[in-house]
Image: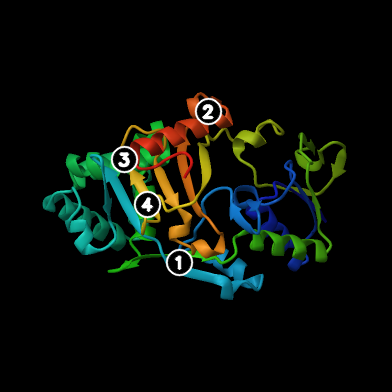
Amino acid sequence: MKTIIIGGGLSGLASAYRMLKEDISDVTILEKGSEVGGMAASYHIDNYHIEKYYHHIFASDSELIDLIGSMGLGADLQWLKGTTGYYIDGKIHPMNTPIELLKSPLSVPDLIRIAYTVLVTRRAKDEEIYKLDRVTAKEWILKNAGRSVYERFFEPLLRSKFGSSHDRVSAAWLFGRIRIRSNRSTSGEKLGYLRGGFHRLVARLTESIVAMGGEIRTNCEASEIRTVDGSVSGVDAGGYIDCDSVISTVSPHALLKIISDAPDIPYQGTACALFGMNRSLMPDMYWLNIKSSVPFGAVIEHTNFLPVSDYGEHLVYVTAYFQDDTDPRWRSSEQELIDSYLGGLLELFPDFHRDD
């Protein structure tokens, strides 16, 4: 049996590894880019690697944790404190401990309602959550926590994650997200990171796949999945490759270009910039959620999570999510996007300078 996997991100690499390890099929991975890794790909800067998009994992990511362990990297998976804050009304408010929450701009009644919301979501049974899939998070929050909690706390978070579709997100998603993020002690939340970078996982998977006889083709874009009598026969990718089965790990939007009956599921995009700085932008804070008119929803200072000494400079991600290719951030050039993000940072942090 021969299987072609379209896409060389972590999903594609993990699928290939498991199929080869369990001797299910011969495997060829087709990756249209020049390197594998997908959203977990990294920049190689001077003497270190850093992910192109911010990365951390949760304790509930059991499949990924098991994969890291199977690659012999389990000892390097570190669980570190990920401090968070909230920018609202022109100020940054830490939001990690009970005392910090009491000092936040939210009223005591609103904090009680938020605590109630967290309690309800953590105690909900799976069958109860499934029923909420057709109820929006907005509807559920307004009904159970009130307009103030929604507008001052949840709406900015939903906007930063889902943009113009924030009011269509299901309550079931919200329940799942709160369950993950509320798994913390009184001192804050612990998040996982692979010391040295997730490029190490990508490299180990690549080595293992090749060692077991798998093939990885980069700069090789699948242009058509061919079928005969309703069954896959092969893939065109700069030449015809016959196969018995295909695993696609690319988005439905990309899959629609190579097969006629793929589901038309809208995917959102992200525009993530990584800045190297000679000083800390927001000392002692890893993740900042933002309620402001700036063109991004979060600032993540990676070197307030991992030691600066691992990199030799302070590393800051600035990120935004958007819904389709009509968004100005999608249509902007790279330099235009960077300039708009730098302008937003200047608005949030008056002491920030472009030469930092």
The dot on residue 156 is 3
Q: Residues within 10 Å of mark 2 (few under 14, many from 20)?
A: few
Of the residues tagged 1 and 2, which is closer to the observer? 2
Q: Is residue 135 visible?
A: no
> Viewed as shown, does residue 161 lie left or right of 15?
left
Q: Amino acid at mark 4?
A: Met
Checking the image for residue 274, the label placed there is: none
75, 257: nearer the viewer: 75
Image quadrant assignment for residue 16: bottom right
Please state which amino acid type lies under the numbered disc 1. Ala
Name the N-terminal-most of marks 2 and 4: 4
Determine whether label 4 and label 3 are within 8 Å by CB.
no
Q: Given the current orientation, which residue lies at the most extreme front position?
A: 355
- From this view, report whether residue 196 is shown above or below residue 259: below
Q: Is residue 223 above or below residue 314?
A: above
Q: Amino acid at mark 3?
A: Pro
State the residue position of label 2: 336
Residue that carries the numbered disc 1 in the rendered image:
59
